[in-house]
Amino acid sequence: MRPDEHPEIRQLSLFKNIAETSFAYLMRGAYLQTFPPKVDLILEGENCDFLYIVVEGGVELFSSWNGRSTTMSVVRPLSTFILAAAVKDAACLMSARTLKKTRLILLPAVDVRRVLETDVAFSHAVITELAECYRGLVTNTKNIKMRSSFERLAHYLLRRLAESNSECIVTLEIEKRQLASYLGMTPENLSRSIKKLEAHGVKTNGTQFEITDVDDLRKLVKPGHVIGEFKSSAQG
Amino acid sequence: MRPDEHPEIRQLSLFKNIAETSFAYLMRGAYLQTFPPKVDLILEGENCDFLYIVVEGGVELFSSWNGRSTTMSVVRPLSTFILAAAVKDAACLMSARTLKKTRLILLPAVDVRRVLETDVAFSHAVITELAECYRGLVTNTKNIKMRSSFERLAHYLLRRLAESNSECIVTLEIEKRQLASYLGMTPENLSRSIKKLEAHGVKTNGTQFEITDVDDLRKLVKPGHVIGEFKSSAQG
DNA sequence: CCTTCCATTTGACAATTATCAATTTCCTCT
DNA sequence: AGAGGAAATTGATAATTGTCAAATGGAAGG
């Protein structure tokens, strides 16, 4: 891939401060590839050969066991995923599939580990990234263990609202059954929870959510204090 | 603290390969301190001033929200905790308290970040450590989301059995209510689950568990394939 | 040795969440 | 536009998990 093909990825926190030669080295071995929707990219248990960058589209990280399956995270542009496995040269703990048509950059994990050895700035960026992924997951785990599914939905909406430009509109960017899986509930119960939200200042219409009474939602979520900062996603 | 006072900590993967001067620098600012049981060490939300090393005893990492509380991890000697917050100079996402009389080494987080800037070997060790913590938490999250509380208990026992020297004996090193919280269930339900285990090749006596039929347990846990590697704990 | 306290256990019950089946709605493809 | 298929919703029911209260047991301290 030509390094200048997607100049925006140079701005990723992982690459922003690394040496030009390091970046060029990484780009030399990089693929740019476009995948259709619902394509499996990674099967958990397999060794991790690439660090992935989502340039366009979206990728779902999920896990399956014994007939069950759960969405761990949804990765949007521009971000990387499966960094932890790539640097450790270890088996992936999550599977990955495209949500829709998706453009990805694949960096060979060997190259990543190689640059890690030579570029201190890259090491530091990886440390920061991993620490953020870890802390995102900590918040996630706290959510799952301490909040009910209804509260998790409310929390999710507030988080999305904080990320959005709008004062009161949140538009889901994933299907509801994937949201349900991410939140650790069934699609049926998500449906019922969404209905219950109407009693708490949220009007819904398909994938659109209008928060008419933020304070009411906040009463459910009780953010700020400790548990859930409004950012982070965790996709190491 | 005298660097030679606890030579074993030099063998921690975090410090094993760092320069002598780096290690000495870290030790120069280090405290060695002994705490009684049930002492609060960290309150989540507060900024993180130290990287902690458990030399003796045990520390519980937990989180509280809205009257609820959950054990996130139990840290045993010799390990560090709260690394992610320390390197990021960020607020702690978990609280910490001693389980029993505990001897800790406190490394000022500023010193840790300082050495990070100068010692490449330390950077690499931190990367590995953070990646492992992250992956531990991923496994944890998968457990909580895909297994029932009874299955989580069975999984926990097998994990502890794998760590132990014994062929068939597992001795709990934490109180049952803490185990319950760690596993995401109530003490009452843990009690009932332990009883249910007797039908699956486990004899119990207080904190002692004798696994008389490992295969039966394995049938419940279905390990190996993907979900749960038998190590890791996650205490970034 | 006894007392006291607290963890654990047990039982009854309630709340939450999942499952199954049947529609309905929405999206895509022709 | 219409048909087909998948997603979402709804209702009924079951399973899991949590809550409350009481009884038991074990460990620490006098």
Image (cartoon, coloured by chain):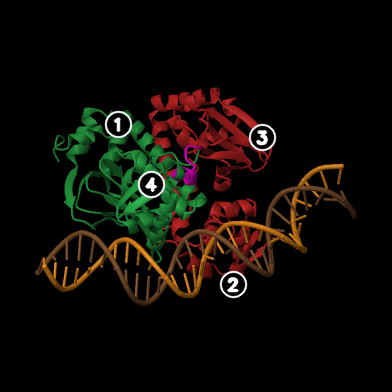
Chain colours: A red, B green, C orange, D brown
| Residue position marked by numbered label 2 in the rendering | A199
Q: To which chain does the residue with label 4 belong?
A: B
- Tell me where the magenta segment starts and ends, as one range: B217-225
State which mark lies toward you, 3 or 4.
4
| Residue position marked by numbered label 3 in the rendering | A35
Q: Write the residue at 51% across / 26% down.
A: A26
Q: Write the residue at 33% across / 29% down.
A: B120
Q: Earlier in the sequence, mark 4 or mark 1?
A: 1
Indicate left or right for B16 with A111 as reference: left
Q: Is residue B6 magenta?
A: no
Q: To which chain does the residue with label 1 belong?
A: B
Amino acid type of the residue tagged 3 in the rendering: Phe
Amino acid type of the residue tagged 4 in the rendering: Leu
**Cα separation between marks 2 and 3:** 41 Å
Do callouts 3 and 1 mark residues in contact (Cβ within 8 Å)? no
| Residue position marked by numbered label 4 in the rendering | B157
State which mark lies toward you, 4 or 1.
4
**Cα separation between marks 4 and 1:** 42 Å
Q: Position of residue B101 (x, y in %)?
A: 19, 52
| Residue position marked by numbered label 1 in the rendering | B118
Determine if marks 4 and 1 fall on one subunit: yes
